[in-house]
Amino acid sequence: GESVGLHLPTLSVQEGDNSIINCAYSNSASDYFIWYKQESGKGPQFIIDIRSNMDKRQGQRVTVLLNKTVKHLSLQIAATQPGDSAVYFCADRFSGGYNKLIFGAGTRLAVHP
Amino acid sequence: GAGVSQTPSNKVTEKGKYVELRCDPISGHTALYWYRQSLGQGPEFLIYFQGTGAADDSGLPNDRFFAVRPEGSVSTLKIQRTERGDSAVYLCASSLTGVVYNEQFFGPGTRLTVL
């Protein structure tokens, strides 16, 4: 399959470490923020979302933090595993834009054993 | 259950030719979206269908691009007079509805290469 994100910024971590992936957004009217994982040759896969009236949400091994003051979103992955290696995208939904998502540029996560 | 499927997985065409890309959404999903993803970029919104109608086509780059969803299920993205700059992965996604926020499920994409 095609490699996605050949020229993306890369975060390299050791297996078992925690990973933090950051994203800045520009639209203060966005009401939902979503993190997607994309493996080579596949479509984006939903990881976790957060509504704009929250500042933190936890899932299984993942936590999303939202700082609306500085328009910043982060994804924390605990105990990173080789299977977490992929490109990660943040996306936001403009509150007046139906379910249309605006994606960021993405970050490649490389997990080393 | 079956996810979103897209055909073909790869399409190579010559500049100036016409292509059709097909998307089969998850059964029961009324909303369908097309995105385009260039190498090293995030997906870029093209068009959104709620049922049979195109509710938002603001992302279509020009009039060479057109999409249909005649029966509210399968959708076809049509590109006329293809250009080399059209080369990208075309992603389709579906969700239960598009009127309120809910999770979008993506297909594997069709990689279009225009020679």
Image: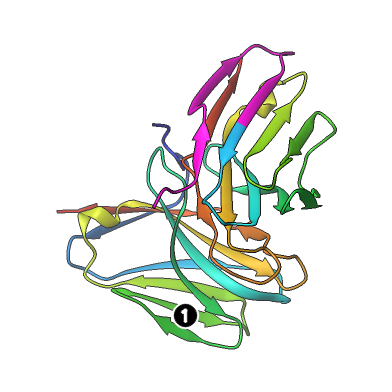
Percent coordinates x, y for residue A34 in the rendering: 52, 68
The boundaries of the magenta stretch are B1-21
Q: Chain of mark 1?
A: A
Queried whether the magenta region covers residue A84, the answer comes back as no
Q: Quadrant of residue A20?
A: bottom left
- Point 56% across, 17% down: residue: B12
Percent coordinates x, y for residue A95 in the rendering: 72, 73
Percent coordinates x, y for residue A107 in the rendering: 45, 55
- Point 29% across, 57% down: residue: A84
- Point 56% across, 53% down: residue: A105
Q: Nearer the viewer, residue B77 or A86?
A: B77
Residue type, mark 1 in image: Leu
Q: Is residue B15 above or below residue B68?
A: above
Percent coordinates x, y for residue B64 in the rendering: 81, 28
Q: Secondary structure at mark 1?
A: strand
Give the residue pinned by disc 1.
A65
Q: Is residue A72 above or below residue B42?
A: below
Q: Residue furthest right?
A: B63
Image quadrant occupied by the C terminus of chain B? top right
Number of marks in the rendered image = 1
Looking at the image, residue A33 sits to the left or right of residue A84; the answer is right
